[in-house]
Each structure stands twice: as C-alpha cells, then as structure tokens.
Image: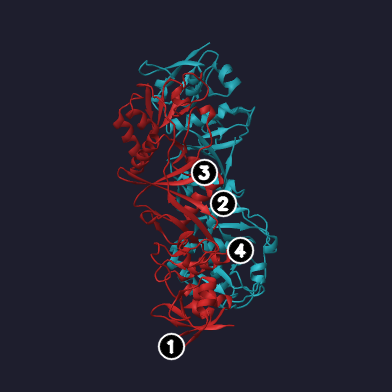
Chain colours: A cyan, B red
Amino acid sequence: MSLEGRYDESANVVRLGENARQRFHDARGYGYPLSGNEIALAPVEAAHLLYRGDLEAVVDVESGERLSFRSFVAREPGTEFGVRFLVYADLRSRGFYLSPAAEPWLVDPPTADFAVFPRGKGPGDGEIAYTMRVIGERTDVPAADLASGVLAVVDEESEITYFDVGRADPRGSSTATLPDGCDADLLADRVVVWDPPLDLYEEAFYGQPLEGREYDRPTLQCSLLEAAFLVERGAIDLESSVVRERGREVEGERFGRRRRVYTALRERGVVPKTGYKFGADFRTYADVESVDELGHSELLVRVHSASAVFEPRDLALDVRLAHGVRKTMVFALVDGEEIEWWSLERLTP
Amino acid sequence: MSLEGRYDESANVVRLGENARQRFHDARGYGYPLSGNEIALAPVEAAHLLYRGDLEAVVDVESGERLSFRSFVAREPGTEFGVRFLVYADLRSRGFYLSPAAEPWLVDPPTADFAVFPRGKGPGDGEIAYTMRVIGERTDVPAADLASGVLAVVDEESEITYFDVGRADPRGSSTATLPDGCDADLLADRVVVWDPPLDLYEEAFYGQPLEGREYDRPTLQCSLLEAAFLVERGAIDLESSVVRERGREVEGERFGRRRRVYTALRERGVVPKTGYKFGADFRTYADVESVDELGHSELLVRVHSASAVFEPRDLALDVRLAHGVRKTMVFALVDGEEIEWWSLERLTP
C-alpha cells in the first residue's frame, strides 16, 4: 500500500500518518515517532522511501504541490542533500539502519551527519556502529576538523569511499647507542659521515652507506633530518645551527615541522626513514634490532601544519597507496612543539 | 698502481697522464682523450676514480693543494655535483658506462646530464641507451621542461628513482551512439538523467546507475564533465551554459582543463571515468563494448595546466600508485585548446 507524506518545508521534515510508526519506524528504522501512529522523516529518509516506491508522493503543506522523488530531490531539501542521500541509500543497501545524528532522532546524538547502527539494530537500541560524516570530493577538510569516526566521501561520479579516521599513537622498541663526534661534511642538502662505526647504520639505522667501499667503516650518507638529530645528540661533529639553517634554506618551514616529527618518532622508539618513494615524509620501523633483519615498515607518515587543509582527493591518494603497500597512513599535525597523530584507513561498512 | 690527477678548477676538469688513455678511457669509458696518452675527466668521473682508489689524489694546479676524495667532493665541483655523483656511481655499479652529455665527451650530445651507453658499450660506439637528467627530490620540475628520456631523482636519503619519461598518445575503439534529449536535472555538483536508454550506461559507459530500481531504464547519475559532454552532443536536455557555469563554480579553472581533456579522450575513442579513488582525474578504458565485459582500465590521467610545476615527490606518489594498480600514469598538459600527453613509468636500468 502506497502512502503520501506531508512535507513541512519550514521544519524540513515529512510527516507520515496511518500505520507509519509500526511499518516504517518500528520495523525498518525510519524517522522518529510523533503522537499516535504518526512519524516524522528527515528529507533523506523520505527521499529513500519515495525512491523505493514505499511512499507514492509527498505533498508540500504550504503550496499543496504534490512531489515525486524527482521533484522532491530537485528541491535539494537540506545542506549537501545529494551526497547525504547517496550515502544514506548505500548504507541501507548494505543492510544498515541509520539516522540523522540529531535530536529527536537520537537522544544525545554524536557530532556527525549520521549515526549508523550495527546490522540488525535500530535507533532505539542504544548502539552506534559508525558515527559518519559525509562530504563531496570537492569539499575541503581542515585538519582541525578531523574527528574520530567514519568519513564518507562521494566522488564526482557518485561512488563512495569510506575512511576510518582515528587517533594514532606510534610506539616502538628501537633504541641504539650513538657514537661520539664522528667526522662529517655538509654537502648541499645532505651530510656525509666519514668512517663511523658500522653500528650507526647497522643497528641504529641512520643514513645509507655509499656503495663500493669496505663495509665495516662505511661512508654514510645522511639526510639533513638525520644529521640534525645526530648533531644534537653529539654523534657527529658539525655545528647544529648550520645543519638546521641549511634545512630551512632548502625546505623552508616544512623542515622545522619534519624535524619535530622525526625527533618525536625517534623518542618513541620508532625509526623514521624517508617515505619519498611513497610520496610521504616517512616510512617507519617500530622494532629495529639490525638492518640485516629489518621487517616491513608499518606506517607512512605525512607531516602537515595543524592549520593545513586537506583535499579529499589527496587523502584518497595517500590512503590508497598506503593500503596497496600494506602500511597504515598516518598524518602528523604539527602545532609548535605539539603533534597530533591521526590514522586514516579504508573501510568497507 | 695509483695515480694523481691535475685538477684545473677554471676548466673544471681533471687531467690524467701516464697510461690513462688506455687504462681508463679505452678500457673503462672514463673521460675524453687529449693529446698522447692524456685524458680529461669531468669532476664526477674523477670523484668516482678517487672513491674507488684508482686515483690516489688530485692536485689543484692553481694552489698545489692535494685533494682526497673527501676534500675533492667537499668543493662540490660543479652544479648539483652531489646528486650527479650518486647517479654516476649507481649506474657504474649496475654495469653501465656513461658520460656527461657534453662535448668533447660526445659528438652531438643530447640535451641531458648524462648519456648512458648500452651495457658493454662505451662513448665511442655511437649508441645511447638512456639520455638522463638528474635532480634532487627538492628540485621543482616545470611541466614545460619535461623531455623524453630518463629522469633520475635522488631522494633526501640518497636513494635513486628512475622515471622513463615519454610522449603518450591515448587511443581506443570505444564509440557508441548517443540518445537524443534525455530528461535530466542539475543537482548541486552532479546531474541526474531520468530513465535514459540502458545503452547510455551499458555501452557508452556514461554515468552510474542509482541502485535499487528496475535496471532497463536506469536513473543515471553523471558527473558534471560527463553531463557537459552529453549536453553538447544533444544527448541530454539541459542548457549547456548552465552545466559549464556550475562546473566553473565548483572547480574554477580546473573544470575547463578537465573538460578539454575529457572531450579529447572521448574523441580518441577512450572512455574516461573518474580517477578519484587513485587520486587522479581519470582512469581510462580504451575498448569498451559493454560495461558487463569491462576490462581493466589502462591509464591514470592527471590534468595540469601547461604552466604547472611538479614536485618530484608528487610524481613519485602518482607513478608508484599507478604501478601498484598496473596502470600507466599519464599527464595531460593543457594550454588553451592544445594538450600534450606525457607518460611516466618507473624504470630499473
């Protein structure tokens, strides 16, 4: 039996009478109860019922106009209506019930666009599987707005990618004793350490040996970040300020942020090596005992200012690449001395 | 037997006497012949012989100073000396001979940093395996400077990535007849086509059906790019200027460039679909007969203005991702109506 709803544009809800409460709310998790058997639907909910043919039409209570699915969605009833509808419909087709993350759909709603309930559960069961934010691929994401939960991005062809966003806390057990005052030269944007003890490479995993010489006293090429760290620990004999100054010359402010993150990772027992081949700042190894027995690196770390603004397309690229090489993508957001660590992973709900 | 060279800093060459011509040039492809048995070496060549211990030292002919490998490289003799030396040494260790791409090392040298000869060949054999340009990862690459050949990028930890850079020419056999004047609505940044013939999706591969309705008259969601193309061919009933205007509103100038490339690909018989999940503008299918038998997409296309400037790290990210999903990375550089197509692939020399 098809029904008609009453669209109250000022409240931006569609009201449904007859046996709606039992049929749509209790049995299928749409809307919230009004008095008696009546329920109220958010526009995405009403559009979904219209689309499926469960609702025949909605009538604009102001103008009396009778709206089909097509004419209802053409009004774009609500912010970002199109992308929210697509995500709503996708999650429904995957067997989830979901509500707008707002009262009175939910008591004490999370800060998000939708609350998605565990499969088989509904709005009254008090459990939330995903708190979900929905954006289009053209919507910028300020780093400051990152929040734990799921970020659904609808691309220009209306396909949806889900990202699981959460706090990260990189920790490891890599510690190694450093030598004292090794000879080194600063050359352009790298540092050559002359004949250091092999352990500096082999156990502590600094630098990269220049190939072709006897190996027990390697010629070690270090990045400016590695060198800046080693200089401050007294392990190589250069002026700390000179190395830092060179870093700023060749990388600007980015060098300071990357140095902060490099230092934090080392202090957390994690070895950062360049992530250049993955387009990231670092790949990291949590438990280095010897370079000969090096495992797989676990994280790709991208360093940003805490005031950075992400484009969803760049997030998609980073997360996709990390996934392809079986690593987790981590964003280190630097604000002065403070670092916030966030991980993003693809999710299939 | 170890030798000493004479470093002429003003000419920036190291001259070697005794049996140098036979020993280093004829047998091992270093330098170019002077009179008699003498040869001249570029600084990278001299540094390589110093590093290997074939040369004991070079003497600065001006100051009389005796230079070891360390003190010679500390002078950074020549532009980008450090990164060029690393690439020179890497290719030597891979069994190649190579020369500076300059006279008198070579007759009619290519525009590059090095000419790398086929394995087993040398500068006198008239064959070049790779014309090679060398940069550090912090050196910007203006799109206008792209050139066919190999681009070697030395990262901050002195590892080298080689990219094979060449012109691309995307072509395909995807052609399909379009319907006339289908009903459509422009909604925010996408277009819904109402009940078009199934072929518009199924054979021509436009849009994405909204799931959950009968399939023979799909509700097709199209991107603004797809819609702009379809509108101009009369396939959907919207104002062309309105769709283009919306594109510019949501994407700015980028929309015009992407529309130019979208149209060119369609005209070349190639189907572009969004590359969002790969962080690119398009993934492309050369030979679409039916969506049911869709093969693997072959290219990832990124659209840029012809005046764009690449950062090597971004190139590394794109090429690495494309490689991981078995596609070729193509850059479409747009200058007004003109498009230059370039492909970049990883190369192991």
Secondary element at tag 2: strand
Q: Residues within 10 Å of mark 3 (few under 14, many from 20)?
A: many
Co-location on one chain, circles 3 and 2: no
Q: State the separation of the CA atoms marked 4 and 1.
A: 45 Å
Q: State the separation of the CA atoms marked 3 and 1.
A: 56 Å
Is A12 placed left or right of B22 in the picture? left
Co-location on one chain, circles 2 and 4: yes
Q: Are marks 3 and 2 in contact (CB under 8 Å)?
A: no
Task: Kindly identify which chain the residue marked by label 2 belongs to.
Answer: A
Residue where numbered disc 1 is placed: B63
Asked whether residue B157 is in view, the answer is no
Q: Amino acid at mark 1?
A: Ser
Task: Kindly identify which chain the residue marked by label 3 belongs to.
Answer: B
Q: State the separation of the CA atoms marked 3 and 2.
A: 25 Å
Is A155 placed left or right of A28 in the picture? left
Q: Which mark is residue B327?
A: 3
Residue where numbered disc 2 is placed: A330
